[in-house]
């Protein structure tokens, strides 16, 4: 954390290398967060560039009231929310369901225990289906699941990033997990 403040201070004084070090340190985290929320690698790459451009141009607005990473997550999440709202009526459907073929594929993936190249392909297929389920959730639930379950942030950090109370973080996280579990309910019935 201290290192981030030092790098940002150096960058504010004109040290371009300090900014490059911050980008290198956080680029994977930012990309993964965006990818988890948006569900598209190319889009995640484009938005990540926009996020770092905003950090570059708005570095003076960082006052140090939170950690640099919290500020960066806030910029990242806000950019994703802006993009989701922009295209909301075109792509996002909260009623997305899996078709029978996808359900069978996922059950097959979970039933298999092979440890070769086929297993890696199956894992990719599983990730794609889980990502589809994540994409079908309302944006606030997708964001909160990403921050907690994928990025491993604390309730307090999520509260700061999303600008909501700790109680609301816990409620939304509970509801998000329930909705995701509902979307993947067919997995739980595979043994029946």
Image (spheres, helix red, strand yellow):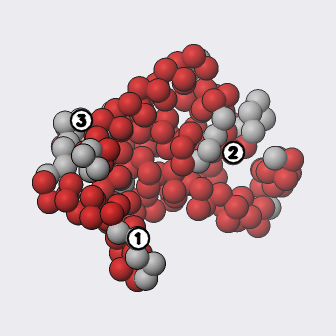
Which comes sooner in the sequence, label 3 or label 1? 3
The residue lying at 18 percent from left, 44 percent from top is 97
Q: Which residue is under mark 3?
A: 94
Local SS, label 2: helix
Q: Is residue 188 left or right of residue 20?
A: left
Q: Return the x and y of residue 147 as percentages of the image width and height.
A: 55, 41
Q: Is residue 33 above or below residue 178?
A: below
Where is residue 14 shown, x and y percent of the image? 78, 58
Disc assigned to residue 69 = 2
| Label 2 packing within 10 angstroms: few (<14), some (14-19), many (20+) | some
The residue positioned 57% from the left and 16% from the top of the image is: 167
Seen at 51% across and 56% down, the residue is 32
Q: Earlier in the sequence, mark 1 or mark 2?
A: 2
Is residue 44 something that shows in the picture? Answer: yes
Q: Which mark is residue 113?
A: 1
Look at discs 1 and 2 and give the one toward the viewer: 1
Local secondary structure at mark 1: loop
Residue 59 placement (x, y as % from top left): 69, 45
Please say whether residue 86 is visible from this viewpoint. no
The one of 189 and 151 positioned closer to us in this rendering: 189
- Callout 3: helix, strand or loop? loop
| CA–CA distance in space, label 1 to label 2 | 38 Å
Of mark 3 and mark 2, the one earlier in the sequence is: 2
- Asked if labels 1 and 3 touch by Cβ distance under 8 angstroms, the answer is no
Residue 186 in percent (x, y) is at 25, 45
Q: Quadrant of the rendered structure where residue 188 is?
A: top left
């Amino acid at each position: 954390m201290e290192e981030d403040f030092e790098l940002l201070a150096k960058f504010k004084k004109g040290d371009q290398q300090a900014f490059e070090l911050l980008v290198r340190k956080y680029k994977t985290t930012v990309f993964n967060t965006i990818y988890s929320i948006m569900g598209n690698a190319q889009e995640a790459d484009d938005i990540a560039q926009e996020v770092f451009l905003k950090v570059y141009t708005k570095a003076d607005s960082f006052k140090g009231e939170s950690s640099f990473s919290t500020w960066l997550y806030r910029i990242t999440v806000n950019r994703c929310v802006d993009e989701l709202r922009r295209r909301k009526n075109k792509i996002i459907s909260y009623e997305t369901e899996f078709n029978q073929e996808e359900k069978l594929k996922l059950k097959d993936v979970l039933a298999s225990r092979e440890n070769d190249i086929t297993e890696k392909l199956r894992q990719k297929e599983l990730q794609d289906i889980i990502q589809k389920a994540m994409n079908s959730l309302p944006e606030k639930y997708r964001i909160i699941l990403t921050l907690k379950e994928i990025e491993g942030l604390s309730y307090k950090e999520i509260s700061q990033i999303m600008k909501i109370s700790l109680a609301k973080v816990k409620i939304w996280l509970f509801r998000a997990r329930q909705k995701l579990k509902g979307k993947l309910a067919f997995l739980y019935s595979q043994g029946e």
